[in-house]
Amino acid sequence: MTEYGRGPGSEPWHPEDPAYGPQGWEGQQAYYQQTQYGNQQDPYQQQQPQQGYDDQQYQGGQEHYAPHDPHQQGVPQQQGYPQQTYAGQPYDTGTWDTGQQAAMPYGAHAPADPYGAQGPDLYGTPEAYPPPQPPGRRRAEPEQEPVRAEPEEPEEENHPFFSDGDDDRDDGDGDEPGGSRRGGGQGRRGGKPKKKKKSRNGLACLVVALVMAGGASGVAYFGYQFWQGRFGEAPDFAGDGTNETVQVEIPKGAGGYEIAALLVENGVVKSQGAFVSAQEKNPAGKNIQDGVYTLKKGMSAASAVEAMLDPANRNALTIPEGKRSAYIYAQIDKKLELKPGTTKSVATAKAKTLGLPAWATGHPDLKDPLEGFLFPASYPVAKGAKPEDVLKKMVARANAEYGKLDIETKAASLGLKSPWELLTVASLVQVEGKYKHDFDKVSRVVYNRLKPNNIETVGRLEFDSTINYIKEESTLDVGTVADLRKIDDPYNTYDIKGLTPGPISNPGVDAIKSALNPTPGPWYYFVSINEDKTVFSVTNEEHNRNVEQYEKEREKSGQ
């Protein structure tokens, strides 16, 4: 067979065959250049001589050459190549004929251009596509060598985002897997394939994944917390707690959430929300005070609120108004389970380091350096605390309260030399006035007696409370005036004129306010008949009559 399968025979078929004549590709090219689409006749009648092939037959079949219309279906097609029939059937010539056109005998007129003069010449302009090559001049595609299947590592995606913009390809080396198709490559024709540079995309993906996972977890967590805070019940323990106890110190002025945070921190309650909710539901919940509480761990919020409202669980040291320092020292020793006298020794030795203001130091003949600065209030005292720690809290509280009342500035307006003297006046008012509603008038009596030109006491205070302070007692029967004047002590107001060297008690806010604002009046004496009746007088004679009435009341009450 010939190369296009025409069958046996000696007749060659090739565009360069002399028997083919000028019917080759060159002859047809002229046709393309001269054709004007429209009414022109078949160019093959004018340019190509008749060939004698039409007389040859093979097994009853006849060969015909039929040129194709170059503009069929609006697509340029190859023209001038014969359509062969073999044994009455068309033979595939290797062209891209669609097979839809019937073969025409050679020499017949070409059909008219179906498009008329409407279509442009696709091969006659500079912008035209290059004309198709005849089958004889087509270059065969080079056959690729069979590729031996070898396992290759999967190629990782190398994106500038993951590789920091580094290019893994080196100039001139060719980093494509398998090498070049034309040779010189590695991998397909032998030799070790060049290893691809490892990128950092794995680590980058891991980091991105972790960040995204963390962000999603954070959103979920805060979303859950938001939902719990708005709509869900706060987590809570059940019951009254375990057998393990803990001491929790609640600072002064702490609110519900601050208290709850301390309880959660010490394992008493499970959540702040549960405690705050229980505190709000309890009618007395807002009465929780500062102090040190001994509480069980793992308590329900409601049980914790009830326990903190019980004074038995409040491990605090409460100092009443008007108590002397000696009483307070004994209470601290008892609270801290110390040997009696321990706190007094610390106060005497470390008075200058406990926070006293400058105007409260350096005074002679003081019986106690902290008298007047152990402010009456409730103080948290945890187990294992030191005496100086408790004393410092008391002095700090006194400084804060005295600062609020501005005693330093107001002392001079009352004829006093310093706030120290004002504090001493307040201490006298606190212990001499049995009832707070009498404090203002008692304060006036003190200031009137301090006047050096008064004819009633001639500048002496003559208060029984100072004698009790000297004797460390608290009694109404201190003795006769003649006997009291014999007591040699700087605190004996029956003997000295003016104020005592320092305060004789630790006054509260009410007594200090009365010392700052005494009620105007001429009184020099007073006596409390009972709780509802205190009588004030100007002269000693009037005062003695009031004292007789007082004695009668005492007899009735059995005192």
Image: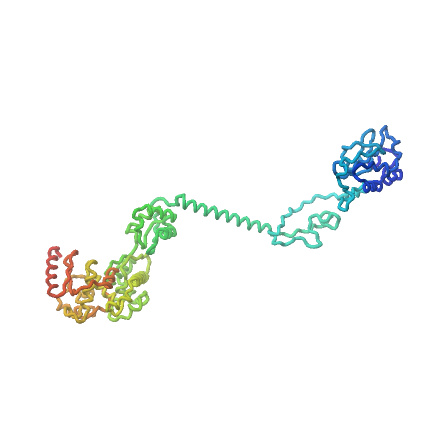
Q: State which quarter of the image contains the C terminus.
A: bottom left
**Residue depicted at x 69% and y 51%:** 175
Depth check: 344 or 127 in front?
127
Q: State which quarter of the image contains the N terminus.
A: top right
Q: What colouring style does the render use?
A: rainbow
Residue 119, visible in the rendered structure: yes
Q: Position of residue 136 (x, y in %)?
A: 82, 41
Quadrant position of residue 512 = bottom left
Quadrant position of residue 486 = bottom left
Q: Position of residue 24 (x, y in %)?
A: 85, 40
| Furthest-top residue in this view | 60
Question: Is 155 situated above or below 345?
Answer: above
Q: Position of residue 13 (x, y in %)?
A: 86, 37
Quadrant position of residue 19 = top right
Left or right of 27? Residue 279 is left
Depth check: 404 or 336 in front?
404
Q: Position of residue 549 (x, y in %)?
A: 11, 59
Residue 326, visible in the rendered structure: no
**Residue depicted at x 64% and y 47%:** 155
Q: How many marks?
A: 0
Question: Is 275 situated above or below 347?
Answer: above
Question: Is 156 situated above or below 110?
Answer: below
Depth check: 217 or 293 in front?
217
Left or right of 97? Residue 217 is left
Question: Is 529 situated above or below 84?
Answer: below
**Residue depicted at x 55% and y 50%:** 208
